Amino acid sequence: MDPTLHREKKPDWIKVRLPNNPAFWSTKSLITDLKLVTVCEEAQCPNRWECWGQGTATFMIAGDKCTRACGFCAVKTAKPDSLESDEPARVAEATRRMNLRHVVITAVARDDLRDGGAEHFKQTIDAVRQANPEIIIEVLVPDFNDRDWALSMVMDARPHIFNHNLETVERLTPLVRSRAQYQRSLTVLKKAKAMVNGKVATKSGIMLGLGERRDEILRAMDDLLEHDVTVLTMGQYLRPTPKHLPVVEYITPDAFEEYKTIALEKGFRHVASGPLVRSSYHAADFRPELDVLEAIETDVRAAQGLELGPEHLSLPTPKAAMIKAIA
């Protein structure tokens, strides 16, 4: 490892924008007012100034204390507090006040709970959908220790996008995520999609710069595709504190762009790749495949006993020749 890597100055391409937008302070005030936790702050995300300036945030439910101690993560490890029964309603109210069109809901790992927090996820999804029916709901979940019945609770709530991060390549998983398993994460992603007959967009992310090799990155891409994942994010690992895993390498923007091209050529539908990319970075830029989106909405309305009317059906775009003929 190059000892100069951990000098105070980082490469020129690692630049963080500071808040200069009133929307940033408005978002911060709203989060404080509703006593919510965001992964933006807890995980020390380098993009929080930019995202909050755009009026978006990733809400972290089930507390701010994690039962796992991953070597890369800034979220504190401690005995978690009890779940707050009104938290789903507070998250829903935040999405309504912010008029969000896309929300990301994540959580700390709650291995202290039998269901790993799955029921809390479901309640939050339901509350958000009721408060903001047009919103795209993305969840970024832990692995629930691969308990199918817990995972099904989340999928029964019908999120539009299901995200579970692989985080790193298989060889480094025991070091980076000591209480997680590479194959288990892949299995969770595949099961989630199967539980809703493919009617969900599945997403995962990996960090670069932890010592992985090029061939291992490409293998991870292939593994994700083989487990029906369609959306991929790749970003630079940045060390939160001296107690966390060191950065082995700073990946150049050109290398990130090359990996994006490779991933798209391999078959991913959407890829976000860059030094400051994180799981939820510009999450709203990706719109789920239209067929998946419509299928989910149809199922949700049917479950609620609502009939689809003409106003809910998408109309085909008229062709130029047809418009000319009518004119």
Image: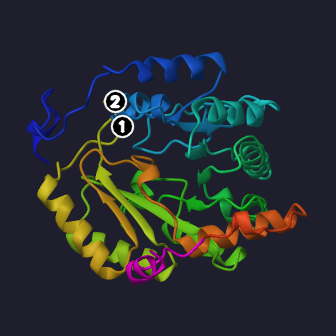
Q: In this view, does 205 lie above or below 44?
A: below
The residue that mark 1 highlights is 244
Q: In which quarter of the image is residue 43?
A: top left
Q: Where is residue 244 in the image (x, y as percent from the top left)?
A: 36, 37
Q: Is residue 261 above or below residue 53?
A: below
Observer-nearest of 30 and 190: 30
Left or right of 295, for residue 268: left
Q: Position of residue 115 (x, y in %)?
A: 78, 53
Find numbered disc 2 in the image and state the secondary structure of the residue it sits on. Answer: loop
Q: Are marks 2 and 1 in contact (CB under 8 Å)?
A: yes
Left or right of 33, for residue 10: left
Find numbered disc 1 in the image and state the secondary structure of the residue it sits on. Answer: loop
Q: What segment carries the magenta color? A: 315-327
Check disc 1: other Cα within 10 Å, few if <14, some if 14-19, many if 20+. some
Q: Which residue is drawn at 61% across and 67% down?
A: 293
Mark carried by residue 241: 2
Left or right of 265, for residue 193: right
Amino acid type at mark 1: His
* Residue at far right of view: 305
Q: Which residue is drawn at 23% across and 67% down?
A: 259
Q: Is residue 77 visible?
A: yes
Examine the structure image and report whether residue 90 is included in the region drawn in magenta.
no
